[in-house]
Structure formats: C-alpha cells, structure tokens
Amino acid sequence: LATGALVASTNFRSSILQLPYGDQAIFVSRKRFHGMGGFPEMPLMEDYEFVRRLRRAALHRSLTEGVWCGVATLPVSVRCSPRRWLHKGVVSTTVTNQVIVGLYVFFGIDANTLYEFYYGARLSKA
C-alpha cells in the first residue's frame, strides 16, 4: 500500500507539478543543461534547484512566446537504487525527503545543513 501511494504521489509531483527529482531521471540536452548553468554546486537539493530553474525558464518562454513549454514526463519507468528505501522504509524515507524539501523551500535552510540532517554526518572539507 505504501509503495503504491509513493508511486502515485511521485507521478503527481513529476507530471502535474513538473517537479521531478534526480532519481526520476532528468533528461535535458547538453546545450540546455549548460545554458541553465548545470547543476549548482550544492551537496543536496541540486536536482531540485536545477528543475526549479528549468520550470522558471519554461514559464518565461511560454508567456513571452505564446508557446507551451514545460517539464515533460515520459510514460516509462527508470530504475534507481532502492538502498535507502529498503533500509529506512518507505514511510520514513518519504517523510524525511518531504521535510528536507520543506525546510529548503519554505524556511530557506541551506544545503550544507540539510546534508548533515539527511546523512547524519558533516561534509568533509575537500
């Protein structure tokens, strides 16, 4: 039951809200990727931030050129590692992920702090 709800909510977020995360496999041309500045140098939320910029650019183009642009979701499945889901459980992982996004979007918590919360470890200094 939890897995079905997870799939449904992920599909809703990706297709209706146009907010896929990195584990939904983001495909974009090299030209567009570099034109958007690529993934920002962040230890966490870089996929979210990149997609947010894509959505903003698509909306701008839609409004200025009168053509629909957006983040499209393909009707195919991709596989990603289930390690965290298996280890922490579907409900716990989902809640943690949503809390991370909420802290980032609504409270402006920086990515380094979120990394420490998510992984339970400080970033190593390179």
Image: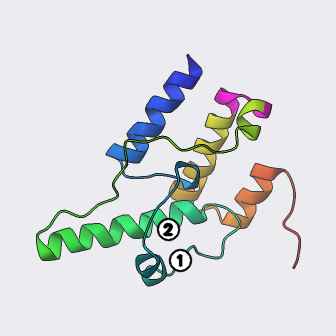
Q: Which mark is residue 50?
A: 2
Q: Which residue is drawn at the image coordinates 74% and 61% (left, top)?
A: 113
Q: How many C-alpha atoms fall within 10 Å of the one at disc 1: few (<14), some, or many (≥20)?
A: some
Q: Residue furthest top?
A: 1
> In this rendering, would 87 be left or right of 66?
right
The residue at the point 42 percent across, 73 percent down is 29
Q: Which mark is residue 38?
A: 1
Left or right of 98 on screen, residue 36: left
Would residue 5 be found to the left or right of residue 115 on screen? left
Q: Is residue 40 above or below residue 77?
A: below
Q: Quadrant of the N terminus?
A: top right
Part of the protein shown in magenta: 87-92
Type of the residue with mark 2: Phe
Q: Secondary structure at mark 2?
A: helix
Distance between mark 1 and mark 2 Cα atoms? 7 Å
Which residue extends farthest left?
66
Q: Hey, what amino acid is under mark 1? A: Gly
Q: Secondary structure at mark 1?
A: loop
Callout 1 touching callout 2 (CB < 8 Å): yes
Q: Main secondary structure of the magenta part?
A: helix
Quick check: is 14 in the magenta stretch?
no
